[in-house]
Amino acid sequence: MTGSFSRRTFLAATAALGAACARKRGSRYQGWLFVASGAEKEIAVADLASFRRVSSIPLPCAADQLLRTGNRVFAVCRDGQALLEVDVARFAVTGRIPLAGKPGGVRLLPDGGTAIVPVDGPAALLSVDLKSRRVIGKLPLPAAVADLDVRSENSDNGLVLTIPGRHTVMRVSLARLQSAGSTDVGVPCTAVRFRRDGKTILAGSEAAKEIVAIDAVSGALLSRLPLPLAPSRFCFNFDGGQMFVTGRGQTSIVIVSPFQNEVAETILAGSSPYAMAVAEKRNMLFVTNPATGDLTMLDIESRSVFASVHVGENPGEILLTPDGEYALVMDQRSGNVSVVRIKTVLDKKAKTNSPPPPLFTVFPTAADARSAIIVPFSA
C-alpha cells in the first residue's frame, strides 16, 4: 500500500543509521600473508584485509624461508634441496629448481631476477637465475656460511659472507662469482652487513663480543668495536646512520654509529631483545621479547622506550605492513600472528600517558613458523 513502511525497510534504515554513527574502522592492508611452516609441508595463507587464515599451499617438503620478487614467491626447502616457485594467484607450486646441497640464508640481488644461495654438503655458493630456473654459477667454499649480505646498489664486489669455521669474512665478485678476497679476523663472525654507503663491512662476533669493521674494497681490517653483549642481529634505521644490535640473553640493545664506528648508546629494551624492525614513517624501532612475550616500541629520535604490548608466548619475527599501519608479530611455536595497530598505540599513549590498549587481534597461521612475507593483492 502506498505510504506504508515495511519491517525490512525499517531494519535497513536502522542499520544504516547505526553504521553512520559508529566509529570508522581503521583501514586494512590489502594483501596476503604467506607463512612457511616447519611442522607441515605447506605455506599458510592469511588475508590481511580480514586478518584470518584463508588457505594453504601444499609443498613436497617443508619450507625454511620465503622470498618475494615482483609477483613471484619462492620457497627455500633445505631438506628438499630445492627452490620452489609459487604462483600467488593460484596458490600453487609451479616450478622447482634443484640444488646441489642444502640451502640456507638465500638473498636476492637488486635486480630481483637472481638468487644467491649458500649450500652445504659440500659448502658452496650458487647463483640461480630465477626466470630460467637454473643454476648459472657455483663458487666452492672452504666451510659453511653463517650469514651474507648484498649491497643495495649494483656493484661487482657487492656480496660479503661470513665463514665462522675459518674465522674469515669473504668478499665475492658477483660478475664472475669468484672470491674477491678473504679477511682473517681471528674470531668467528656470524651476522654481517654492508654499511649504507657500501664502503665498509660490519661483521659481528658473538664469541669476542665485538663488531669488526672491514674495508669493502681492499679487505683491510679497519677496527674492532667492543660491545657489552654478544651481537647476533643487526638492524639499520631508514638512513643507515644508526645500527641497532641485539644479543641473546641480554636486557638491552646497543645503538652503533656505523660512520663514526662507535657505540652511541646502550638502552633497555625489555627482556631478551630479539628480532627488530624499523617503522620509517613513525621513526620507531620495534623489538620482540620472547622471554616475556612482549613487543617493545622505541622512539629512535629520543632513544627511549615508548610503549610495550603483550603479544603472546614466544614472539619472534616482526613484519610491518607497507602502509605503515600494522605490526605483525609471529609466534615462533604456534604460528599465531599478533596484530598491533600502530596508530592506536601511539595515540593512546600520547593522549593519556596510560598503558597501551590490548592487541588489535590475533589469528592463527602455521605451527613452527619459520618465515613470512607480505604479498599485495595487486601482485
Image (cartoon, rainbow, N blue to C red):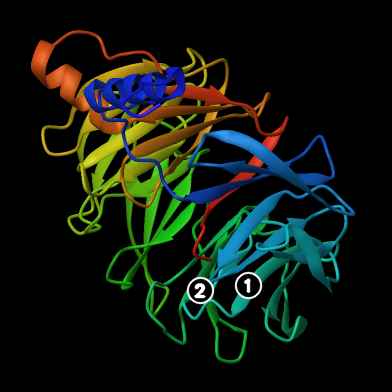
Residue kind at label 2, given as amino acid type:
Leu
Residue of label 1: 116
Query: Farthest bottom residue?
Result: 176
Between 12 and 279, the one nearer to me in the picture:
12
Residue of label 2: 159
Number of on-image labels: 2
Residue kind at label 1, given as amino acid type:
Ile
The answer to whether 147 appears left or right of 286 in the picture is: right
Q: Is residue 103 visible?
A: no
Asked whether disc 1 touches disc 2, contact meaning CB atoms under 8 Å apart, the reply is yes
Q: Is residue 311 above or below residue 45?
A: above
Q: Is residue 103 above or below residue 33?
A: below
Image quarter in which the N terminus is found: top left
Q: Is residue 244 above or below residue 88?
A: above
Q: Residues within 10 Å of mark 1 (few under 14, many from 20)?
A: many
Between 155 and 121, the one nearer to me in the picture:
155
Q: Residue 135: percent from the left, percent from the top? A: 76, 82
Q: Residue at coordinates 55% horizontally, 91% vertically from top-left?
A: 175
Q: Is residue 317 above or below residue 289?
A: below
State how far apart marks 1 and 2 are (Cα): 9 Å
